[in-house]
Amino acid sequence: MKRITEMLAAGTTFSFEFFPPRDDREQRLLTQAIRDLAPLRPSFVSVTYRGGAASRHRTTAVVEDLLRTTSLVPMAHLTCVAHTRFELGEIMGGFRALGCENLLALGGDPLPEGQSKHELAYASELVRLGRRLGFPSIGVAAHPAGHPRSPDLASDRRYLAAKLELADFAITQFFFELDEYLRLRDDVAERGVRKPILAGIMPITSLASVQRMAELSGYRVPDAVVARVTAGGEGHDAIRERGIELAAELCAALLEHGVPGLHFYTLNFSRATREVYAKLGMVPAS
Ligand code: FAD
């Protein structure tokens, strides 16, 4: 199966997110992470669109490499912000020409002065463009705590439901408590949209860096989660151990509540994902 839509129709998906490398050191980390995670046989892997226009070549190169040298099914991310409508069409055409059937259509964060194109303002417009160009399997982003540029949660949910109606599935920003996911799913369902919403999983291996990433996406790591991961002390190993435990418990609870897919933010490392898999009994602990 090459399309995420078909995978979701067949059962629960397990997927990994990577970012395209900027230099040789990052390339080595990515190559190693892919090598270590491929044996877990993910349903698909996704490649982010990192930063501005330079990602056109970087993301395309990783997608091409995955298709040429592995049996993994890639999903390319693409953001509106860095390109004109014409360029976005060209980039999508390029992904399709490589044999990539899956796209994550994103608005993208504002770029430094002069680099934002402003031709397509929202992810929903990119979904429409992708459909017109015949992209068969399109996902979008969902933000359990609401998007930071939204005036309020209700309007964000309204736009998310409308966007998801056009797309095939959504993947959430990371979160740490089951209720955050269930509230999002219920809110979207209340608006009459029942497309699959995959849960984004970020095992906490460093509290400070997760809090920084959370802040950037307008999310605050819940106090109860901070208390739980620091209960054994503030040392790196103690936090890491509890962070992995917490991620495994969240995954198990989500699976129990019928989540259609778990999408792991790997940050181009493999260890945390493999440890969560082991705790879920999906691979032997190594
Ligand atoms: P959009 O759906 O475009 O929404 C942005 C804001 O506009 C929201 O507040 C929304 O409520 C509002 N809105 C939507 N439609 C309308 C409308 N018609 N009228 C008025 N307001 C509207 N970023 C990257 O740069 N590269 C990546 O690869 C990347 N991958 C991601 C993967 C996932 C799973 C997630 C959750 C996020 C990812 N991001 C990525 C971050 C994302 O680009 C940012 O969160 C960005 O600020 C918003 O993108 P979006 O697609 O969620 O927003």
Image (cartoon, rainbow, N blue to C red):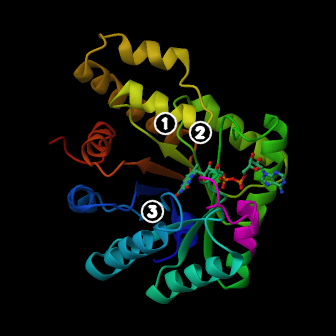
Ligand 1 under 8 Å from disc 3 Cβ: yes
The secondary element bearing badge 1 is classed as: helix
Is 225 above or below relative to 38?
Answer: above
Q: Amino acid at mark 2?
A: Ser
Is 159 above or below relative to 250?
Answer: below
Q: Amino acid at mark 3?
A: Ser
**Residue 171 magenta:** no
Reading the image, the residue beneath label 2 is 217
Is 96 above or below relative to 243?
Answer: below
Q: Which residues are magenta?
A: 112-128
Q: Quadrant location of the C terminus?
A: top left
Is 150 above or below relative to 168?
Answer: above
Pinpoint residue 75: horizontal percent, then vertical percent: 48, 68
Crowd class of label 3 (few under 14; some 14 to 19; many from 20; radius 10 Å): many
Number of the label disc, if any, that sits on residue 213 = 1
> Is residue 23 rendered to the left or right of residue 109?
left
Pinpoint residue 197: horizontal percent, then vertical percent: 62, 52
Q: Nearer the viewer, mark 1 or mark 3?
A: 1
> Is residue 54 rendered to the left or right of residue 129?
left
Number of the label disc, if any, that sits on residue 46 = 3
Ligand 1 under 8 Å from disc 2 Cβ: yes
Q: Are marks 2 and 1 in contact (CB under 8 Å)?
A: yes
Single out the residue that lies furthest toward the left: 286
Q: Amino acid at mark 1?
A: Met
Distance CA(mark 1)–CA(mark 3): 19 Å
Distance CA(mark 2)–CA(mark 1): 7 Å
